[in-house]
Image (tube, rainbow, N blue to C red):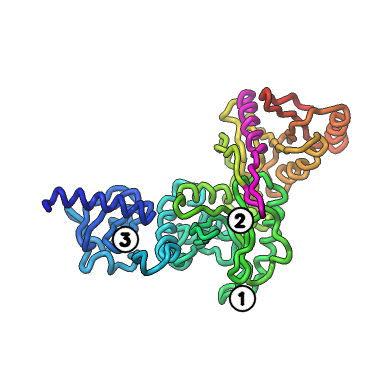
Amino acid sequence: MDRRTKATVNRDKALRLNEEWRVGAAQARYSDDGHWYALLDRFPAALFDAHGYVVIPTETDYRTSTNLRIGKQISVPRPGISALPEYVRITSANETTPNDVLGATRIPALAETLNATAGAFEIGRLQELRSQLRSRKRAGPSALFDRRTIHDDYAFHVGGRKELQFNIGLETRDGVPGVRHGVAFSFELSQSLPTIEQLLPKAARFNDYIRSHPEDFPGFEMWHSDGGVRRPVHAVMPIAEDLLRPGVFLTLGRWVPDAVVDPHEILIDFDRLLPLFAYVESDGSSRPPGAGMAFRPGCPQFVATATASIPERVTEIPLRHKVLQRALYESLSSEVGADNVAIEHQLELGVRVDAAIREGARLTFYELKVAPSIQASVRLAIGQLLEYAHWPAATRAAELVVVGEAAPDGDARAYLTLLRDRFTLPIWYRQLTLHPPALGPRV
């Protein structure tokens, strides 16, 4: 076989193995003996031989590696990449089960891929956020996962053993191997966690956030294992008191079959769960150092529907709150300009208000509620708005607006006027309709 034909064969093998073994490399190279490879210029990259591979997360890792000699080609000292400590060996199908192969190889490679690509997402600044929450002047390691927290069948974020942890792991459902991802509490005791007492206040804040922001979790589900036995999946809800005990591992997130695992989607979901993490890991008593209230105009790309698994049935849930938020964004943008509207506006308290508008130096907070009446909407929203605007660590809002679908009546007008006149609360109500899309006047 001539050199050109050999290069074509090796290129095809690299592409095939990258896909078959689901490594997720942006660039793949193959060599039969794991010794000579073509140069790399896209990352994360992977070098393959006939029995396994090595992931190179970044160009810096590539350029500074003491195991690679980079010239006109990449040279790896013999016996080749199989001798490198980061080498992932793929055993043959007749030696082990597909899930065993996944367990032996997939999580370390997936964790490294997430590390390499997290910089384009909010989750890439997780360690900086952790330092702010703990009043540290300097952040710790920047990686999401590292060798201390990456295992054959699971990984959690650096520093996460005693926290609400960002977690990935292998899980088989109905005989189908797959990967879970999300946030988790590990109440499993170990030398580093001899008691779960320090996790109990965090579980309480977790429950508080779930009760206050049920609309934040479309497409997610919860489940737990007890003594290694997984219990049925259910909708997102506060943690039951009888689960706050040693031996329980509880997850809020998603599970997907191995064939459709997508690192990009995992990072998107991690970003969605960051506000929950920040609230749980903050004591709520003060502003994290350096945490300002940056105004970031725009509206997230919400999903229109999601399937939530409930024991013995699967229900298609219309994400009405998110649909209404999009309509609210469009209506407010037409009033004050899109550059002055922020949906899911982040607050210093580690939570988000549904919408904020900026008019000069003034901010107005909007809290949207899906409720059958204006009375119910105001009841649900008023506590959150007052906390967001008047808690000692909070940035002040000039006005507070409750948004709902119900039409205001005389009683509602009288009640809101009373709140403004007697208690000097700058609170209003606006009706939002979808058909046709319209945001009514303040009452």
On screen, residue 159 versus residue 279, left or right, reads left
Specify the quadrant that holds the C terminus. top right
Compare marks 1 and 3 and give the one earlier in the sequence.
Answer: 3
Residue 285 visible to an observer of this rendering: no
Secondary structure under the numbered disc 3 in the rendered image: strand
Distance CA(mark 3)–CA(mark 2): 32 Å
Q: Which of 225 and 328 is in front in this view?
A: 225
Q: Are marks 1 and 3 in contact (CB under 8 Å)?
A: no
Q: Is mark 2 on a helix, strand or loop?
A: strand
Residue beneath disc 1: 194
At horizontal 85% and vertical 29% (from top left) the residue drawn is 413
Q: What secondary structure is found at the residue carrying circle 1?
A: loop
**Image spot of residue 126 (x, y percent):** 52, 54
Instruction: Please say whether residue 322 is one of the residues in the magenta stretch.
Output: yes
- Position of residue 188 relative to residue 325, above or below, is below
Front one among 279 and 210: 210
Relative to the observer, which residue lies in front, 238 or 430?
238
Which residue is disc 2 drawn over? 252
Residue type (three-letter) at the residue carrying disc 3 = Tyr
What residue does disc 3 label? 53
The amino acid at mark 2 is Leu
* Mark 2 and mark 1: Cα distance apart in space: 23 Å
Residue drawn 69% across and 52% down? Answer: 209
* Front label number (1 vs 3): 3
Q: Earlier in the sequence, mark 3 or mark 2?
A: 3
Provide the residue span drawn in magenta. Answer: 308-336
Q: Is residue 416 above or below residue 267?
A: above
Cβ atoms at labels 2 and 1 below 8 Å apart: no
